[in-house]
Image: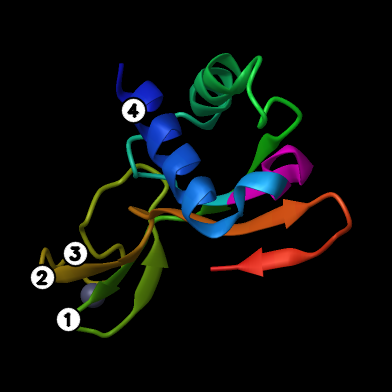
Amino acid sequence: MHELSIAEGIIDIIHQHVTQERLHDVRSVRVKVGTFSGVVPDSLEFSYQAITSGTTLERSFLMFDRIPFVIQCMECQQESVSEDGITLCPVCNSVNTKIISGKELQVKDIELEDVQQENL
Ligand SMILES: [Zn+2]
């Protein structure tokens, strides 16, 4: 399952940034998820809870920053939010566009019990 391996990746990142003694103090883990990253946040949270249950991270949870899918047109230079993931410029109908955001999947920060933040 796709989300399960991503949840494992997030746990690896937490282990890289938080010392062993402080793992049980981890509260929220903020994750940037692009609309078209291919990840379903609810299912990722579910996988994360399943894996961390009974571990030092069991009281932690994921928080999602949802990033819209934005394209920029190389012809008319307009940036547009695409609701459906179509990379066609809605202004001039050019297909010559590049993706600005919406595909990201990234741990942004990890918040510990005493509100000390580990910014990534
Ligand atoms: Zn255009």
Residue under pointer 4? 5
Callout 4–callout 2 Cβ contact below 8 Å: no
Which tag, 3 or 1, sits closer to the chain's start? Answer: 1
Q: Position of residue 114 (x, y in %)?
A: 89, 57
Q: Which residues are magenta?
A: 22-30
Q: Residue 10 has which mark?
A: none
Q: Is residue 92 above or below residue 86?
A: below
Mark 2 near ligand 1 (CB under 8 Å)? yes
Ligand 1 located in image quadrant = bottom left
Q: Residue at x 85, y 49 (%)?
A: 113
Residue under pointer 2? 96
What is the basis of the colouring in this image? rainbow
Q: Position of residue 74 (x, y in %)?
A: 17, 81
Horizontally, is 115 left or right of 8 in the view? right
Residue under pointer 3? 93
Callout 1–callout 2 Cβ contact below 8 Å: yes
Mark 3 near ligand 1 (CB under 8 Å)? yes
